[in-house]
Image: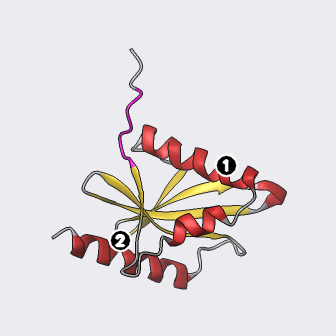
Amino acid sequence: MIDRSKKLPAFFYESALGNRPVRELVLGLTLEDRKLVGRDIQKVEFGWPLGMPYCRNLGNGLWEVRSDLTDGKVGRVIFCVARERMVLLHGFVKKTQKTPPQDLRLALKRMKEVLRDDE
């Protein structure tokens, strides 16, 4: 029998002001790119734990969902796992090979907020 349950349901990080930056990023993409990112997040939700090429451990409790977008673009959604949930912290379209340090710092800051709120 095939297990069709989500092993790690995804939730958007929400700031104190009610902003959901990853949701806003995804909604700003083309329809085709939104579908690609959504499908890749869904692969992690149903297949967790999942490794390359779909998901990569960034260290310090951060993970990334890796998406190949249209026109050769590359998208990333950084998440953490909190209370058996996938919390989508930060997303961006890559412009360089390496994940920019400011993107990692922002995701780490948001993860600390999420974990602090769970206490």
Q: Is residue 71 above or below residue 92?
A: above
Q: Nearer the viewer, residue 91 or 47?
A: 91
Residue 32 in the image: state x and y as whole percent.
75, 50
Location of the N terminus by quadrant is top left
Secondary structure that dominates the magenta span: loop
Quickly name the residue at label 1: 36
The residue that mark 2 highlights is 60
Q: Position of residue 55 (x, y in %)?
A: 51, 52
Q: Is residue 42 left or right of residue 83?
A: right
Query: Does residue 92 appear to the left or right of 46 in the view shown?
Result: right
- Label 2 residue SS: loop
The local crowd at label 2, few if under 14, some if 14 to 19, many if 20 or more residues have their Cα within 10 Å, is few
Q: Earlier in the sequence, mark 2 or mark 1?
A: 1
Q: Is residue 5 magenta?
A: yes
- Toward which corner of the image does residue 11 lie, by quadrant? bottom left
Give how far across and how far down residue 112 sits, in percent: 30, 77
Q: Is residue 69 above or below residue 15?
A: above
Q: CA distance from mark 2 to mark 1?
A: 26 Å
Q: Residue furthest top?
A: 1
- Dot 1 lies on which element? helix
